[in-house]
Amino acid sequence: MKPLALTTLILLPALAWGQHGESSWKFENRETIHRSFDVSSASNPKKLLLDNMNGFIHINGYAGKEIQVTVEKHIRAESGAALADAQRDVTLDLSQQGNSVRLYEDGPFRNHSRGDRHYGYHVDFDFEIQVPSDTELTLKGFNQEIQVKQVAGDFDIHGFNGGIDLEDVSGAGTVETFNGKVKVAFSQEPRAPNPLQDLQRLGGRLFSSPPWTPTSTSRPFMAPSTRISRSTLSPVARARMGSLSTGQATA
């Protein structure tokens, strides 16, 4: 299915792009992309793989058979030429193979550590996605938050700048971020003995909100008092507890 896109080109006086130091950039482009992917085949598990550099990722589970994607693409640039460069060079691949859907932001910044000022533009892709509730998730986000709600599939989630918020989930997997709050709330007692197989947070804060009374053998990585218990973590996560500066480790 071809994407449906609505594009608006706006040339405005400078706005306060203070977050990125782009207060003098006057050129802007917005585009809305809609795609739907049928993942109803019974032969393979449903999977979503998303790799995003700039922009938030919001995912909600539902009782459907499609992965429904809405993307808001927003470009800010210092000149018309830089705007044209961003439109040409920064792309979003939306593809499907069987029941696996891949969404991947690409651009020259993937191969270089240069910032926005070098290129003269900044591009955000904000994702609002609905997935069948049993979809397995592999998510990578560099800037801004990642939110997942009402998903029962397993997960592998990596952030850098921005929090990670999992609400009403019941799968198992990995959560990792560098800066930002990590919050995990399970909808029921997880199926796996160690629902968070790996956990790393080098900045920000950690939270958990289990809807049941924790026990010594089955509970999420952190009890409501924000105390971390080694007995609830996998060996890999236990080995990384030295990286966690919030909470108190217990034997």
Image (spheres, helix red, strand yellow):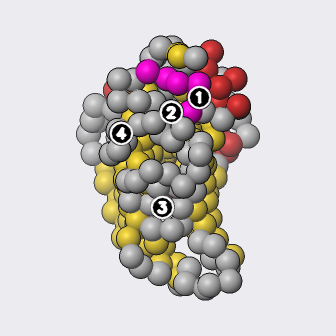
Secondary structure at badge 3 equals loop
The part of the image, by quadrant, that contains residue 178 is top right
Badge 3 crowding class, 10 Å Cα cut-off, few under 14, some 14 to 19, many 20 or more, is many
Residue 229 within the segment the image draws in magenta = yes
The answer to whether any part of residue 143 appears in the image is: no
The answer to whether the residues at label 4 and label 1 have Cβ atoms under 8 Å apart is: no
Per the rendering, the mark at residue 213 is 4
Question: Which one is closest to the eye, mark 3 or mark 4?
Answer: 4
Q: Amino acid at mark 1?
A: Ser
Q: Amino acid at mark 4?
A: Thr
Start-end of magenta stretch: 227-232
Q: Gap between marks 1 and 2, in whole Å?
A: 7 Å
SS at badge 4: loop
**Residue at 64% from the left image edge and 30% from the top image edge:** 237
Q: Of the residues under marks 4 and 1, which one precedes in the sequence?
A: 4
Callout 4: 10 Å neighbours few (<14), some, many (20+)? Answer: few
Residue holding disc 2: 216
Three-letter residue code for mark 2: Ser
Q: Are marks 1 and 2 in contact (CB under 8 Å)?
A: yes
- Per the rendering, the mark at residue 231 is 1
Residue located beneath label 3 in the image? 152
